[in-house]
Image (tube, rainbow, N blue to C red):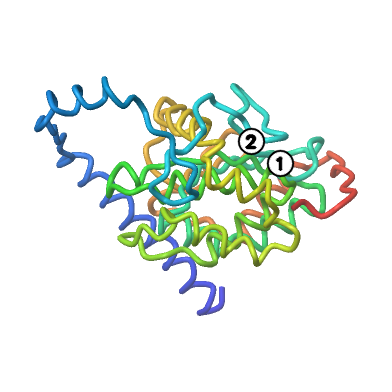
Amino acid sequence: MSQRNSDGKRSAREALQEQRAREASRAKVRRTVVVASGLVAVLAIAAVIGVVASNRHSDTAARAGTAAAAPTGATGTDSLVIPVGAPEAPSTLTIYEDFRCPACDAFEKQFTPTIHSLEDSGQIRTEYHLVTLIDGNLGGTGSLNAANAAACAQDAGKFRAYHDVLYANQPDEQDDKFGHTSTLLDLADQVPGLKTTTFTDCVHQGTHDSWVKQSNAAFGNSGFDATPTILLNGKSIYGQNSALTPDSLKQMVATANKGKQPAKVTATPS
């Protein structure tokens, strides 16, 4: 193993260990804040004026996503999976990720080229589950808003490219930059053909917010407790003290696919 590869493996492992330690610590100290001031006055005003709808597209505007509207092409139980790659691929890589999660970013930076190569050669399909752990731990809406925007990109057939752009531009974990729709729309400029009126409205309105929340709730009931969680054909292959490398992932897939034909890939997944 080259020194560069060794350093990359340690960096990803250390980031994963640090992230999971932070998540565990924050889960213990999470507090519930109850705001009870001015209730009588608020109820009195609400009875007179009702609910005021805002037409402004801003980060503070009410987001329209109420029903769990799954993005186009979503699969799996309750349509909570975003698939990438040929459906007939002989192996399935399952990825649970949070766009604000630094350990997820470390994983992506180390493994993305290998995953794309395996997808594009028909050896695997990847099934993404979008999670919002960091919003829950640190507050903010960056995990939710970024996941909604990624689901909007899936509607446009450009999930993979936009997913990669989000990780390439991930802010510091403490910075809720992805909570601003302006940031998410600016990043969409890096994906040719993505930033249409339909995509922009989907991002502003939070069209898939409820779907993202349902995906996160399913993760909470899955038995897994940290991101990233990576499975190959249902078996966990990446975690704390993981020795997984891009080369060993390719070898695992080759072993799993022994005697099986790769799927026919007609176009590069987007």
Which residue is found at the position 80% from the left and 42% from the top?
A: 86
Query: Amino acid type of disc 1?
Result: Ala
* Residues at circles 1 and 2 in contact by the CB criterion of under 8 Å: yes
Tell me which numbered mark, 1 or 2, is placed earlier along the sequence: 2
> Residue under circle 1?
256
> Residue under circle 2?
233
Residue furthest to the left: 37
Q: Could you give the CA–CA distance between mark 1 and mark 2, rounded to whole angstroms?
A: 8 Å
Between 87 and 204, the residue placed more toward the observer is 204
Query: Amino acid type of disc 2?
Result: Asn
Q: How many marks?
A: 2
**Residue 18, position as x, y percentages in the image:** 31, 58
Which residue is found at the position 26% from the left and 20% from the top?
A: 47
Judging from the image, what secondary structure is the residue with disc 1 in? Answer: helix
How packed is label 1: few (under 14 Cα within 10 Å), some, or many (20 or more)? some
Query: From the viewer's perspective, is residue 113 above or below residue 265?
Result: below
Between 195 and 256, the residue placed more toward the observer is 195
Query: From the viewer's perspective, is residue 96 above or below residue 10?
Result: above
Mark 1 against mark 2, which lies toward the viewer? 2
Direction from residue 220 to residue 199 in the image, left or right: right
